Image (cartoon, grey):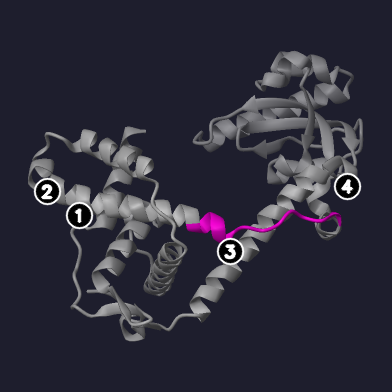
Amino acid sequence: MRYLAEVTTLVLLAMIGFSPLVHADDEGIATIDGVSVSYDEFERMVYTEARQTFYHAARPDDDTYLAFRREVADKLVDRKLKLREARSRGLQPNEEYVALELARYEAQYAGTEQWEAEGEAMLERLAVYFEEESLLEQIDAALRQVGDPSDADIRNYYDANIEKFTEPEQVRLSVILLPVVAWADGGTWDAAREKATGILTEIRDGKDFAEAAREYSGDPSAANGGDMGYVHAGVLDGELLKVVSELGPGEMCDAPITVLEGVVLVRVEDRRVPQLHTLDEVRDRAAGLWRRDAEQLEYEAALARLREASEIILDEAYLEKLPN
């Protein structure tokens, strides 16, 4: 957790300008209604987004990286548009939030050599950043605002998204698992399969499945005779799911099945067919999902309106070439 906190701090400091970056010339990556957005700010945002997007910050292939940089440029433009809209509406930063964040960073860095040299400038930039973050949180909420759904809205959403209100098929399974670690050699896996085949023969010859599970299984369900209870079929391992889907209640697999945890024998005890919940049963959930989707649509439409009302010019030539 400490490492993650340090990474988050580094990313933030990069965003406000305390990172090694390649600086471009003094022109802008974009202009919004004549106001320039600097290359330097863009490259800082690329740096921070990349740290959070790509594994170990390793750069992907050229085409992917160029597409990523264009997405960042669009995000930066949206950020500027939203900040301008927040200020035009008279929104003010949450001073308590800003003060708490500044105090947290000062406590973290106070006494360090970097803080002695750059602390005052760092606080100034952090203050701007946290003020903007506060405004963005407020304007995002405002741009997402929608009214309460009508009964017709809820009904229409329910009818159009039946799968979201249908409980998937459930199967009640009993298993006998012979655990094998994933990195075991082939001989170990073969031995487990051979032992499972022998257990399968014992059961076919009359041994009770539950008794065999208590004797041989390494699964936690062994104490219950291998009974795992009801599970959603979709959570099963691919090969196990294929076998289970072909078995009826009371039927057992014909051969051992290899899964990530080892080798398994399985018997289907019962099946519950998919169940559609009525609108009355899920009305609150349907209303909540409608609101979530409606807010996202409204937010996207609001951003589109802000863009349409603005003259936005991107430096296409800069975005089409890889940085040095």
Residue at the image point whose x is 83% and y is 45% from the top: 283
In this picture, is 180 found above or below 34?
above
Q: Which numbered disc, 2 or 1, marks the residue closer to the eye?
A: 2
Few, some or many residues within 10 Å of mark 1 (<14, 14–19, 20+)? some
Q: Which residue is mark 1?
A: 18
Q: Which numbered disc, 1 or 3, marks the residue closer to the eye?
A: 3
Q: Does the rendering let one see residue 323?
A: yes
Kind of element beneath mark 3: helix
Mark 4 or 1, nearer chain start: 1
Where residue 156 appears, as percent x and y from the top left, is 84, 60
**What amino acid type is highlighted by mark number 1?**
Phe
Q: Which residue is mark 3?
A: 299
| Image marks 2 and 1: residues in contact by CB distance under 8 Å | yes
The C terminus sits in image quarter: bottom left
Q: Which residue is mark 2?
A: 118
Rounded to the nearest angstrom, the CA distance separating label 3 from label 4 is 27 Å
Residue at the image point whose x is 86% and y is 17% from the top: 208
**What amino acid type is highlighted by mark number 3?**
Tyr
Range of residues picked out in magenta: 139-151
Where residue 6 appears, as percent x and y from the top left, is 29, 40
Where residue 232 appears, as percent x and y from the top left, is 77, 38
Rounded to the nearest angstrom, the CA distance separating label 4 from label 1 is 54 Å
Where residue 28 appears, as percent x and y from the top left, is 27, 78
Res. 215 image quadrant: top right
Q: Which numbered disc, 3 or 4, marks the residue closer to the eye?
A: 3
Mark 2 or 3, nearer chain start: 2
Rounded to the nearest angstrom, the CA distance separating label 2 from label 4 is 60 Å
Residue 55: give its label: none
Rounded to the nearest angstrom, the CA distance separating label 2 from label 3 is 38 Å
